[in-house]
């Protein structure tokens, strides 16, 4: 079964992620494009550094060519945001990136982008699944990659310069040059090193890079920037007196940051920092967007600026859509994805990193000092989360309890409202909250909570675990 979740289709290599399924998934996209009137259109194809990613991208291109489309293949491992940018810049109806983003090394997958470089929404991916269900493996059309390349059916290119220039146009290069910052980069064996290094060196920063070699096992860790996975970057920042440490996930659409003291900055903190900076110091105006599992401190900042903070379900396509609808400055999620107005309509860890560096240069303040400025004005909230592995049978039982029987624990707090739009989120009268939802990309139950004290946050999470017997 090929099912698209909140971040595309992902599966374990040699289990669900096979050549047969890759061809079927691509044929489903082709059938949908034919129905939508895009027969013969150019389609961008990219890939990351994962095992089989390049080969899979070629299989995708072979099927696209077999159905009469014109594949434009980015011919080296590249950040997913670069693929999205290319779809937007070339005004293409669709793009595909072979990546499993921040998933463990045994996974790979395909992300689908629509016109404008947007993440395909559930309507699009649902129609692709319908087309896949009508196909048989033996009926999938394809053309040999090298033959199609020689015939000019498949085109290769590397729009790296265009992507980099688009980011440099948005940041104050002159201001960064004058700040003489030292930045440490950890691409986590992924695809951001060339882009980040080029941008920062252009801005005359001193740049040090760790974990830049190609390793399909990602050093034995998940390629997801977290406090645990960035300990080496933290040590490096402190020992070498860097102004900032920047890390990106496997395909560079998510961001992790270490401040000048070696402290890991949670993605919630980054989102609040960037919105505060762009509104107060860059004088941008507009609302912000977050998903339902992300800090409500952002709401406080927006309200103070006379703006609205919009809440949407998990899945960056929802954030992108709401940003476009409201002309929001920024949208983000607690897992590290950020999008900023004016660039692409999706996550871009490289652009967000460039803005953070600009923030240091323009304000003349360290990250820790800027965040103290924010919490001194708006107070502090304490966020916590848990990821719990569950079997399909256990998931079915919990779905029954949570969304059919609508069971709810006794949290011992006054409840303002409950939402089951995406998971089960409980909003309390004092402004705290807790949510329980199933991952759209992995066999996980995700818990998150936020309250005025760390103890209260942990209590919410523990009550959920006990109630669901996890």
Image (tube, rainbow, N blue to C red):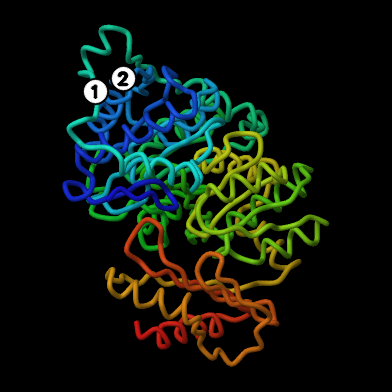
Q: Residue furthest front?
A: 134
Report the disc number at residue 126.
Answer: none
Q: Nearer the viewer, residue 430 or 87?
A: 87
- x and y percentages locating residue 337 in the rendered image: 51, 50
Q: Earlier in the sequence, mark 1 or mark 2?
A: 2
Quarter of the image where the C terminus is located: bottom left
State the residue at coordinates (65%, 66%).
296
Q: CA distance from mark 1 to mark 2?
A: 6 Å
Relative to 63, residue 133 above or below:
below
For the point 60% across and 65% down, the residue is 295
Dot 2: element: helix
Residue extending farthest to the top is 151
Residue at (26% x, 23% y) in the render:
62
**Dividing the picture into quarters, in which one does residue 325 lie?**
top right
Is residue 335 or residue 312 the one in the foreground? 312
Q: Is residue 270 left or right of residue 370?
A: left
Q: In the shown orientation, is residue 85 left or right of residue 453?
A: left
Total count of labels: 2
Residue 362, located in which quarter of the rendered image? top right
Going 56% across and 38% down the picture, which residue do you hit?
354
Q: Is residue 7 left or right of residue 272?
A: left
Q: Report crowding for label 1: few under 14, some 14 to 19, many 20 or more residues within 10 A (C-alpha).
A: some
Label 1 sits on a secondary structure element that is loop
Q: Which residue is mark 1?
A: 142
The image shows residue 274 at horizontal and vertical percentages of 64, 50
Residue on which the image places disc 2: 65
Give the camera-side residue of 183 and 18.
18
Q: Where in the figure is residue 72, as x and y percent of width and height? A: 39, 20
In contact (CB < 8 Å): disc 1 and disc 2: yes
**Quick check: 359 left or right of 422?**
right
Does 12 sit above or below residue 454?
A: above
x, y (%) of residue 238? 45, 55
């Amino acid at each position: 079964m090929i099912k698209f979740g909140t971040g595309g289709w992902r599966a374990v290599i040699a289990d669900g992620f096979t050549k047969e399924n890759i061809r079927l998934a691509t044929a489903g996209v082709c059938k949908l494009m034919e129905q939508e009137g895009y027969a013969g259109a150019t389609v961008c194809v990219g890939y990351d550094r994962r095992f089989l990613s390049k080969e899979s991208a070629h299989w995708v291109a072979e099927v696209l060519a077999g159905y009469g489309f014109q594949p434009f293949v980015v011919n080296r491992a590249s950040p997913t945001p670069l693929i999205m940018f290319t779809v937007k810049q070339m005004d293409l109806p669709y793009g595909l990136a072979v990546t499993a983003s921040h998933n463990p090394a045994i996974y790979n997958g395909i992300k689908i982008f629509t016109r404008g470089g947007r993440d395909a929404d559930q309507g699009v991916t649902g129609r692709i699944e319908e087309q896949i269900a009508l196909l048989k493996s033996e009926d999938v059309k394809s053309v040999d990659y090298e033959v199609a390349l020689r015939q000019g059916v498949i085109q290769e290119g590397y729009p790296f310069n265009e992507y980099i220039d688009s980011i440099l146009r948005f940041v104050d290069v002159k201001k960064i040059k004058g700040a003489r910052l030292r930045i440490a980069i950890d691409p986590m064996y992924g695809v951001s090193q060339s882009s980040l290094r080029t941008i920062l060196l252009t801005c005359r920063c001193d740049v040090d890079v760790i974990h830049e070699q190609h390793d399909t096992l990602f050093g034995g860790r998940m390629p997801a920037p977290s406090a645990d996975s960035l300990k080496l970057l933290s040590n490096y920042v402190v020992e070498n007196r860097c102004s900032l440490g920047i890390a990106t996930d496997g395909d560079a659409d998510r961001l992790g940051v270490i401040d000048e003291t070696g402290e890991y900055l949670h993605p919630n903190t980054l989102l609040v920092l960037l919105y505060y900076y762009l509104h107060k110091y860059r004088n941008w105006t507009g609302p912000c967007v977050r998903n339902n599992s992300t800090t409500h401190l952002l709401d406080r900042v927006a309200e103070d600026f006379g703006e609205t903070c919009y809440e949407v379900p998990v899945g960056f396509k929802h954030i992108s859509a709401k940003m476009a609808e409201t002309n929001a400055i920024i949208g983000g999620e607690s897992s590290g994805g950020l999008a900023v107005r004016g660039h692409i309509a999706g996550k871009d860890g490289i652009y967000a990193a460039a803005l953070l560096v600009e923030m240091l240069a323009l304000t003349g303040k360290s990250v820790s000092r800027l965040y103290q400025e924010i919490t001194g004005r708006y107070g502090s909230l304490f966020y916590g989360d848990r990821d719990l592995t569950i079997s399909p049978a256990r998931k079915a039982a919990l779905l029954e309890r949570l969304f059919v029987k609508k069971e709810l624990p006794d949290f011992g707090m006054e409840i303002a409202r409950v939402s089951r739009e995406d998971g089960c989120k409980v909003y309390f009268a004092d402004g705290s909250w807790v949510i329980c939802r199933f991952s759209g990309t992995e066999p996980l139950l995700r818990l998150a909570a936020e309250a005025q004290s760390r103890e209260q946050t942990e209590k919410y999470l523990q009550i959920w675990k006990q109630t669901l017997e996890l």
